[in-house]
Structure formats: structure tokens, C-alpha cells
Amino acid sequence: DKGNHRHFMEKEIYEQPEVISHALSHYVDFAENTIGANAAAIDFKAASSLAISACGTAYLAGLVGKYWFERYARLPVEIDVASEFRYREMPLSPSQAALFISQSGETADTLASLRYCRDNGLKIGAVVNVRESTIARESDAVFPIMAGPEIGVASTKAFTCQLAVLASLAIGAGKARGTVNADEERALVRHLAEMPRIMSRVLNLIQPQMESLSRELSKCKDVLYLGRGTSFPLAMEGALKLKEISYIHAEGYAAGELKHGPIALIDENMPVIVIAPYDRFFEKTVSNMQEVAARGGRIIFITDEAGAAASRLPTMATIVLPVVDEIIAPMIFSLPIQLLAYHTAVFMGTDVDQPRNLAKSVTVE
Ligand code: F6R
């Protein structure tokens, strides 16, 4: 049932505040502002490093998770797409922990990576939406994302719920490893707790602008997304979402890679979507944006109030989000990239919930 939404994808985008709050309440004690025991079902303290494997959007959630586990828990992370992970014969040891991220819990390559790790004696955690799935059954610990059924082929709420769970696990791992103290834990958890309310506000705030911008995007043949830090995986997620439902060619790049190749593509026909909250990477990303502007590129700047005030570069559009803590920025900044892809596809008249050639669950290699 789509309720009063045109597509499941739209319904699922707007469900995010509610399902994220549900997901968080499984991992977080909001009365005490602490991370609870459900986030500690794997012994991150004893782990020498963490291996993460997943496909598509779930892989990009894992890539954001890598930044968090390394930053908050000082736990080194090895991550790869499951189709490479399973075959690249990486040396593994039983002192490592492994996480597999999958909405369906049935993705063939992710399952094969899991079995490879299990055969090597690693402790296995599964971040899944479907709790009865094969990947969940074959894991030592299951971390449900509690997103509810996701019908739209393009993943939206599962992605942000995966992020919310990974953030909780990374903070929990930091607590276990002594790299996040009690004050930091409380502060981070308070930020997580604010997230659902901020998401609702942002969804309402940006909707009309996303709809009108989608008209511009629908005329384009190619779109480039740029970001740094956790905004880099978001840039790739933005590009993935746009290409899979609107069939517009899109690429996501680390902003610092611009001058190593993609800058050659910049002209007035290809919009460049720059994802840049006012964080410690902001100035660097803005200098990349300057390189785009200097070559006549048209910029769609997704930033926050502080970032908008700090940059004077001319843009085709600036999407201004509230200033939020770094730990929740990836979830908040997911909203404009989802809505932009959604409205562009709607405007172009594609089959948004069932894009051509794609399946919701990829159970063959
Ligand atoms: C993109 C998308 C896919 C899936 C991928 C993994 O919007 O939905 O890239 O993320 O096929 O699927 P799961 O998470 O079920 O393993």
C-alpha cells in the first residue's frame, strides 16, 4: 500500500524519520543516552580489524561505516564489494571480525563472502533488514536495521537505516575499545536521537526545490557528484540512485580525484553536484568546486547553513540544510540526493519502483 504516495520509493523516503527512530531504539538507550547491549553482539574490543563486504547501496553504507569505525573506534577496516571480496584471496585471520550488509539478506556475492570469512574462522555479524534471511541465519550476530519492507527497487530507507545501525555499532565499538569516553558517547547519542526530527524537517523544507531542480537534471546526459570524507560514499550513492531510476549517466567521485581525470569532462552541459557539509573537509571541497566553476561547470551545491554562508561561488542552485553533527550528516544529506533522483525519474516518466533490468534481490552471481 502506497498510502497517499505516487510510488513506493516516495513512501519509503518519507518513512525514514519513523523507521530510523525505530532502528535507533534497538541499539540506543535514550533515557541514559548510551549505546545498548544490542550493539555489542560482536566483540569489537578483541578484534584486530574489521572486514566489511556488501553490494551496491549496502556497500556504500559500509564505506561510510569504515570512516566511522576508524575514527570513533580506531578499528582498521578492510572493505570491498562482495563480488571482489569473495575472489581476491585476501589473507584473513580469526582475530578479525567481519560485517556483511544486505537489505534482503539473500545477495549471492555477499553470502559467498560471508562463507569465505566463516571458513577462515572470523566472527560474523550481519546488518540485514530481513531477519529470517540466509545471511542472518549464517551469522554469529544479527544486527537488524528495522526498516520494514522495502518495495522500491532503489534502496532509500534501508540505506539510511543501515547507516544509523553502523553509526551505533561504531560508537559502541569505540566505547568497548576505550576510544570513546562516556561524555563523548552521551554527546554522540544525543545527536543520533535528534536525527528523526531533523529528517522530517528537512524532507518538508527541500521538497519544492528538489522538484524544480529535477526539471533541470532531466535535460542532462551526464551528472557528476563530488564529496570528501563520508560525503564521498554519498556522492557515489547519489550517482547510483540517479542512474538506476532516471537512466541518466552519473558518476560519484572523491572530490580530490577531480583533477586526476574527471575534470576533463567539465563543461556547461554537465551539472556537478557537490556534497559538502561545513565540516573539516569543507575548504578543500570548495577549492575543488572553484576548479569546476573556473571551467564553466554548473554547480548544484548541497551544503548546510554554515557552508552556504562561507562560500561565495556562483552556483546553479544551493540546497541549504541545517547544521548538524558530523555523525548524522550522512543520513541528513542522503535526503536531497534521494529526492533529486526520485523527482528526476518521475519527471522523465520512468518506472520508478521497477527500473528496467534491475531486481530487488540479486540471488545469482
Ligand atoms: C541500489 C540497490 C542495490 C542493492 C544491492 C544489494 O538502490 O538497491 O544496489 O543495494 O543489490 O542488495 P542487498 O542489500 O539486498 O544485499
Image (cartoon, grey):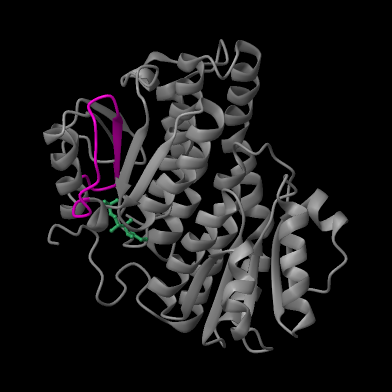
Q: Find out whether residue 125 is within the magenta segment.
A: no
Q: Residue at x 57, y 77 (%)?
A: 262
Residue at point 51% right, 67% down?
A: 252
What predominant SS class does the magenta segment belong to? loop
Which part of the image, by quadrant, shows the N terminus? bottom left
Residue most extreme to the front: 91
Q: Give the magenta part as a residue range.
A: 86-105
Give the x, y percent position of residue 59: 36, 51
Residue 336 visible in the snapshot:
yes
Q: Answer with left or right where residue 197 lies relative to residue 295.
A: left
Residue 349 lies, in percent from the top left, at 43, 82
Residue 295 horizontal/vertical position (percent): 74, 84
Q: Quadrant of residue 134?
A: top left
Residue 300's place in the image compared with 86, above or below, is below
Please say whether residue 104 is one of the residues in the magenta stretch.
yes
Residue 209, given in percent of the width and then of the height, sits at 68, 67
